[in-house]
Image (cartoon, grey):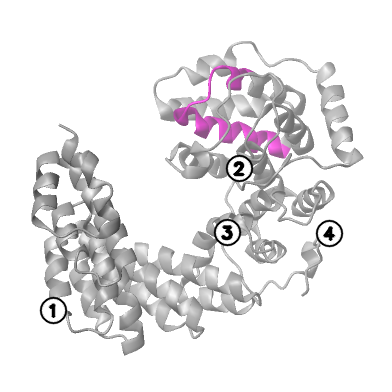
Amino acid sequence: MPLCNTGTLPISTMNTKILLPTAGAWLTTIAAAYYIGSSDSSENSAADTSASSAKSSQSGQYSQLSGNRYSSGSTNSARLSARSSASNSGATSAPSGSIRSISELGDPIERSRQLLSYIDTLSASEFESVVDEFRNMGMTRERMGEYSMLLHAWGKADPTGAIAYLKENTRSDFAVKEVLASWASTNANAAIAWANENHTGDKANPYLVGIIRGLADTNPTLATQVLQQLPFSEERGEALRGLTPRIAALGVTGAQQWLSGIEDPKLVNGASAYLADHFSKQDPEMGAQWVSTITDEEARQRALLEVVDNWADKDPSAAQVWIETLPYDDQMKAGPEFVSSYASKDPHAAADWLDARSNSENYQTLLREFAEGATRKDPVLALNYGNELNDESSRSRTVGRALWTLYRQDKNEARNWINNNELPERVQRYVGRMMEDQ
C-alpha cells in the first residue's frame, strides 16, 4: 500500500505475506544486545563517548546533516523534557553504587547476569539516575554492551523520558536509536508516530533508522514499509544494512519475494547488493545463485561485484572457475574486481592470472586494478605493472601511490626503482624529495 510521509502506520493494514520468526523473550533480546554492543562495529564505535553529564550540543554526527539533528522545532519536544523533569524530581534514586559495582565485575557473563537482574528491579523513574551514573564512569567499547542493555530496558519502561534525557546529554544518535529500536519492538505505532511528529525538514528522518532496526525481528513487513518512507540517503542505507540479515534468513527465494514488493529502483539495487554481500559471505555459491536471479542490469552488476569480492577473498581458485562460467559481459565486469581482490591477497598468483589475459579487450582496466590491489602487499610488483598503463593520468596516480608505499617501506629500494625506470611526468615532480631525503 502507498506509504504516507507523516502519521502512524497501523499494523492492522499491513500485508503480512512476508514473515520472519518473531523475537524471543526480553532476556534473549537484551542478551543479544550485549553481544552486539560488544562487537567492534562502526556504529558502536561512533557512539557517544562522553562521560560527562553536562549539557552538550546536539549535532548528529552520523549522516553529516547540518544543524541540530534532533531538534524537533515543536512543542512536543518541550513537553517530553518537562515530563522527564517532572517524573524525576520526585523519583527515588537507584541504590547508590549498584551499577558501578556491577560494571567493575571482571567476568563478562556474571556482569551481564547481574545487570539483567538489576534492571528488573528498576522502576521507570529510576533509569535516568542509573544511566547517568553509568555514563559518568566513562564510556569504553567494553561497556557499550551494558549501555545498550540499559537503553533498551529504559526504552520499554519510559521511551519518551529516555529520549528527552539522551537528547540533552549525548552528542551522537546511537543512544536515541537504541531506545527507539526497543520502543518499536513493543509499540510500533507509538514509536512511528513520535518519530514523524518530532522530525522537521525534508531530509531523511533519522529516527526511523532505529525504529526499522527494532521492527526487523518482530514485524519485518512493517519495517520494510517504514524503510520505503526514507528517501535515498545515508540513513536509508544504514536502515537497509540492519534489515538485510533478517531478509537473508528467508533464503534466496524468500528474499526475491521480499524484493519484488519494493518499487524504488535505487532501493532495489541497494538491497540486491547488500543481500549479495550477506549471502556470499555466508556461502559464495549462495551469493552466485542470488546473482543469477537478478534481471535488472544495474542491480545485477552491483550484486555481482559483491560476490566476486567476497569469493575471491575466501577462495580465489573457486571464484575464478565461477567467473569463467558467466556470460561474456559479466566476465568483463567481474574481472577487474576479481584481480584487485586477488592481488591484495596473493599478488604473484594474481599476476599470473593477469598475464594470461594480456590480449583481453579490458586488459588496461585489469592492469590498473591489479596494480591498485597489489600496492600494499608488493609495491614493487605494483610499480612494474602500473607503469605499463597507457592512460597517463591512471599511470601517474597508480605509480605515485605504489612508489610512496614502497618509499615508506624501504627508501633504498624506492630510490633504486626510480633510477632504473621511466617515471610518469607528474610523478617526476615529487621524486626529488625522496632522492634527497637521507
Marked residue nearer the N-terminal end (3 or 1): 3
Q: Looking at the image, which residue is at 61% across and 48% down?
A: 63
Q: Looking at the image, which residue is at 18% across and 84% down?
A: 359
Please state which of the two labelled residues, at mark 4 or mark 3, is closer to the viewer: 3
- Residue of label 1: 356
Please state which of the two labelled residues, at mark 4 or mark 1, is closer to the viewer: 1
Q: Position of residue 316 (x, y in %)?
A: 21, 68
- Local crowd size for mark 2, using a 10 Å CA cut-off: few (<14), some (14–19), many (≥20): few
Q: Is residue 190 above or below residue 320?
A: above
Marked residue nearer the N-terminal end (4 or 3): 4
Q: Mark 3 is on which residue type?
A: Gly
Q: Is residue 1 magenta?
A: no
Q: Is residue 121 above or below residue 64?
A: above
- The mark found on residue 237 in the picture is 3
Marked residue nearer the N-terminal end (4 or 1): 4
- The mark found on residue 26 in the picture is 2
Q: Position of residue 76 (x, y in %)?
A: 88, 40
Q: Is residue 154 magenta?
A: yes
Range shown magenta: 133-156
Pointer 4 with pointer 3, Cβ within 8 A: no
The residue nearer to you, when weighing 83 against 19, is 83
- 223 left or right, relative to 109: right
Please state which of the two labelled residues, at mark 3 or mark 2, is closer to the viewer: 3
Q: Mark 4 is on which residue type?
A: Thr
Quadrant assignment for the N terminus: bottom right
Q: Mark 1 is on which residue type?
A: Ala
Marked residue nearer the N-terminal end (4 or 2): 4
Q: Mark 4 to mark 3: distance in Å? A: 20 Å
- Residue of label 4: 6
Q: Can residue 133 be seen?
A: yes
SS assignment at label 4: loop
Marked residue nearer the N-terminal end (3 or 2): 2
